[in-house]
Amino acid sequence: MAKNIEDIMTYEPADALVFEGPFDKYVKRQLVIRSLSDKDMVYKIKTTSPRLFYVRPNIGLLTAKSTVNIEIYMQPKLSTVPSSLAKHHKFLIVAGEATEDVEDFHGFFKQLDPANTWEGRVRCFLVHRQPEVIDTLVNELAEPIRQTAGGVDEVEVMNDALQGDELEDLNMTKEKVTPLEEEIKDIRGTTENVEKAKENRCANRSSKLFMFVASLVTVGAVILITHSGEYAIQRIKQVF
């Protein structure tokens, strides 16, 4: 079981990270971690919403008695937030003692024994600048909301927070995919138009063929009637 991270470091804000709207642009907040230990520590930031937030740096070395400023960005994803408690976004700080020089931080955590880790959780609130929402948030912060290792009852899925360059790659991929989706829509629309044109041509051809056959039948009937009439007149003349 992970140990309480407050034994080796402090972090600010200690209560919660508050992101104020409107959320149609990037919103940045800062998380400051300070080492209380005489030993170097490797830290990592995880979050329940890796596609909404990205962290810079999201992993690194916290040397003895030092401080690291971590920038957390919220993407312009939400236009409205009905309540500050619509979803409880959380951040998890994970740390482990660097007993030797560490070059691969991700590999360090993969090999780290969970019993030798420290964890601390920080809640996150998304609020609009409205008095009633702020009052709700203040009431929530009046309670002990910071949750550390062993203090969480519900099961949470924490993911590694995205680094800035990772988010940039993700956005570039989205930018490439969007034009392709538009091209696919255009191709589908063109295909549908071609199919409709074919159907219309077939319908026109069928209509013209029907009219042609009807005309032939009409002409044939007229000829037949005319020929029969002349024959009848000749027979009458012969009789009289």
Image (spheres, rainbow, N blue to C red):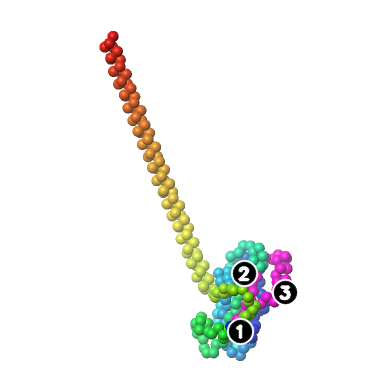
| Residue 125 is covered by the magenta coloring | yes
Residue drawn 57% across the image and 73% down it: 157
Query: In this figure, which residue is indicated by the disc labeled 1?
Result: 3
Q: Which one is in front, 112 or 105?
A: 112
Find numbered disc 2 in the image and state the secondary structure of the residue it sits on.
Answer: strand
- Name the amino acid type tagged 1: Lys
Residue 168 image point, x, y percent = 52, 70
The reply to whether residue 21 is visible in this rendering is no
Q: Which of marks 2 and 1 is nearer the N terminus?
A: 1
Query: In this figure, which residue is indicated by the disc labeled 3?
Result: 142
Question: Marks 3 and 1: which is nearer the front?
Answer: 1
Residue drawn 62% across the image and 80% down it: 150
Residue drawn 38% across the image and 39% down it: 206
Please give left or right for residue 91 compared with residue 178 in the image.
Answer: right
Q: Is residue 187 above or below residue 162?
A: above
Residue 54 image point, x, y percent = 57, 72
Find numbered disc 1 in the image and state the secondary structure of the residue it sits on.
Answer: strand
Q: Which one is in front, 115 or 189?
A: 115
* Highlighted magenta segment, given as a residue range: 119-146
Task: Judge the density around disc 3: few (<14), some (14-19), many (≥20) Cα neighbours within 10 Å.
Answer: few
